[in-house]
Image (cartoon, rainbow, N blue to C red):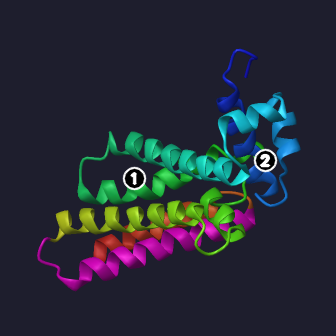
């Protein structure tokens, strides 16, 4: 980033790296402003509080994932390919974090540090619900008359993906996500 990059963008980029790498609670305002190369007042000119910055960071992560997923959808022509695009989008999004040391889902990591009722947790819940909804929609395309099997399978795929992401975060690489994709293929073949 250059000094011509707006302070808000520099702050969000610095927060994204530090929150992901170090954690939300462990990252102070001084570290964020120093990493962004801006004065502390710039932070408060752009965000009302650290909590506001955390919420903006989480919304940005959600938007990034949606963009990655939309990119994957461009080449997905069947419902099965659209389901696998969700898995692929997680692998792609994981790759964006390798420079900072892959630690799993940045949204879940941040949510784990936030108190119940915090607006940031609602962003995370929204993303996880969105993933399950996408699975449900694509499963319905595959088998419109499948009844309750659609909801059960969507939930199963969601748990598979999120569990794999958690384990991938512990491992520090995306191999579990790639394995989960293979398992998803076998689930879809039996659906």
Residue receiving disc 1? 85
Residue 144 in the image, given as x and y percentages of width and height: 13, 71
> Does the segment drawn in magenta span residue 152?
yes
Label for residue 18?
2
Q: What are the residue bounds of the magenta stretch?
A: 144-171
Residue 128 in the image, given as x and y percentages of width and height: 47, 66
Instruction: Check the image and report above or below for 1 versus 159.
Output: above
Residue at horizontal 78 percent and vertical 47 percent from the top: 18
Label for residue 166?
none
Residue at horizontal 58 percent and vertical 72 percent from the top: 117
Quadrant holding the N terminus: top right
Residue at horizontal 52 percent and vertical 55 percent from the top: 90
Q: Nearest the camera: 59 or 65?
A: 59
Within 10 Å of disc 1 (Cα), the crowding (few <14, some 14-19, many 20+) is many
Contact flag, marks 2 and 1 (Cβ < 8 Å): no
| Mark-to-mark CA distance, 2 and 1 | 28 Å
């Amino acid at each position: 980033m250059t000094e011509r990059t707006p302070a808000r963008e520099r702050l969000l980029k610095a927060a994204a790296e530090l929150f992901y790498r170090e954690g939300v609670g462990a990252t102070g305002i001084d570290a964020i402003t120093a990493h962004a190369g801006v004065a502390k007042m710039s932070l408060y000119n752009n965000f009302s509080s650290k909590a506001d910055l955390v919420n903006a960071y989480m919304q940005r992560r959600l938007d990034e994932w949606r963009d990655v997923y939309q990119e994957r959808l461009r080449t997905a022509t069947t419902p099965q390919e659209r389901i696998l695009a969700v898995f692929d989008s997680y692998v792609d999004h994981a790759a964006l974090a390798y420079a900072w040391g892959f630690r799993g889902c940045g949204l879940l990591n941040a949510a784990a540090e936030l108190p119940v009722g915090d607006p940031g947790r609602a962003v995370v819940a929204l993303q996880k619900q969105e993933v399950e909804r996408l699975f449900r929609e694509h499963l319905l395309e595959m088998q419109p008359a499948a009844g309750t099997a659609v909801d059960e399978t969507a939930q199963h795929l969601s748990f598979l993906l999120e569990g794999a992401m958690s384990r991938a975060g512990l491992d520090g690489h995306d191999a579990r996500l790639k394995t989960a994709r293979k398992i998803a293929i076998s689930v879809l073949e039996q659906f």
